[in-house]
Image (cartoon, rainbow, N blue to C red):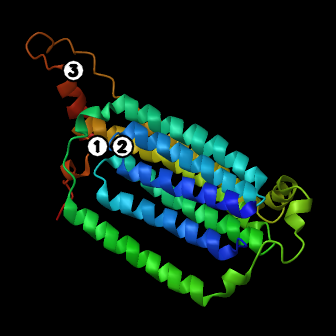
Amino acid sequence: MEITLNHYLAVAATLFVIGLMGVIIRRNLLVIYMSLEMMLQAANLTLVAFSRFNHRIDGQVFVFFVITVAAAEVAVGLALIVALYRLKQTTQVQDLTTLKF
Amino acid sequence: METFFFWLFSIGMILFGLGVILNRNAVASALCFAFTIVFMSALFVMLSAFFLAAVQILVTAGAVMVLFLFIIMLLDLTAMEHVPRQKVWMGCALVLGLGFIYIVARTLYATPGGSITADSTPLPLQTSDDTHQIGRLLFTTYVAPFEITSLIILVATIGVIVLCKQDEPRPPSPGEDATRKTPPVESKKETSLTR
């Protein structure tokens, strides 16, 4: 069986769904953040697959930007989590209900 | 052979991805995430994106995961693992995930992507080096986003320093030192609240 573009897209979609489910079912802010990161990487896999099967390398340049911005974003997000932990002494989302309507 | 390795790396990646969201220990989740990234880099190699595979391992599995592990161990989250799971949310997640998978499967069956194979036409990527091409594109077509990315990193660095700056406890002024002595934790909380 030949590996086609659809195989890669299906695998990336599965990884994206796993990240989405992690965001919904987990209660720890750090693990939720990791799941978000996983969704981002699934999108990266899609972009690289499209770039490969369309014979254009622009998609890989885009993935390069995504990885860079994701790394910066992780640093800022973890700093926010640390600041939140200093304020509230917790990283569980059910304890952070100040803005809840 | 390519088929075998594709399934090996894909299934490994998905299993470790499930490990991220099913492990109760945050450190184990982080390690599973690192392995997910390693398997994804293997898939990048199969897609002949060698430069991105190296960058992925260096940046995501190396730097980002070390940052995650550092924060997990800094905050010491081992005491919070015994919260019972909520079945309602797991059901919601399952329904949402299966619905998403169904939509994607319908879309993939409707599009001609299943007939596009890697060997249908000769590849420009496989013969020449992809690093060369990416570098050329970065400094010609995409030079403006490249420079803006450097600005983003600078802003992120400054932002992290501002966010994580510990407020130093104020030196007691001469009039109030003996009468009023607040514990350091309380004063820290107070100052960070008033900021």
Above or below for A87 versus B56 = above
Q: Which residue is mark 2?
A: A81
Q: Say above or below: A13 vs B26.
A: below
How would you rate the neighbour count of disc 1 (Cα within 10 Å): few for under 14, some for 14-19, many for 20 or more? many
Give the letter of the chain under mark 3: B
- Give how far across and how far down residue A82 sits, in percent: 36, 38
Give the percent coordinates (x, y) of residue B119: 83, 73
Residue B99, by quadrant, is bottom left
User: Which residue is pictured at 27% across the width and 16% down the height?
Assistant: B171
Residue type at numbered disc 3 = Pro
Question: Residue B186, relative to residue A75: is it above or below?
Answer: above
Residue in view at x 20 percent, y 65 percent: B88
- SS at mark 3 in the image: helix
In this rendering, the label closer to the viewer, 2 or 1: 1
Q: Position of residue B148 (x, y in %)?
A: 66, 56
Q: Which residue is mark 1?
A: A91
Circle 3/circle 1 CB separation < 8 Å: no
The answer to whether B151 is drawn above or below residue B58 in the figure is below
Q: Is residue A24 left or right of residue B49?
A: left
Regarding mark 1 in the picture, which secondary structure is present there?
loop
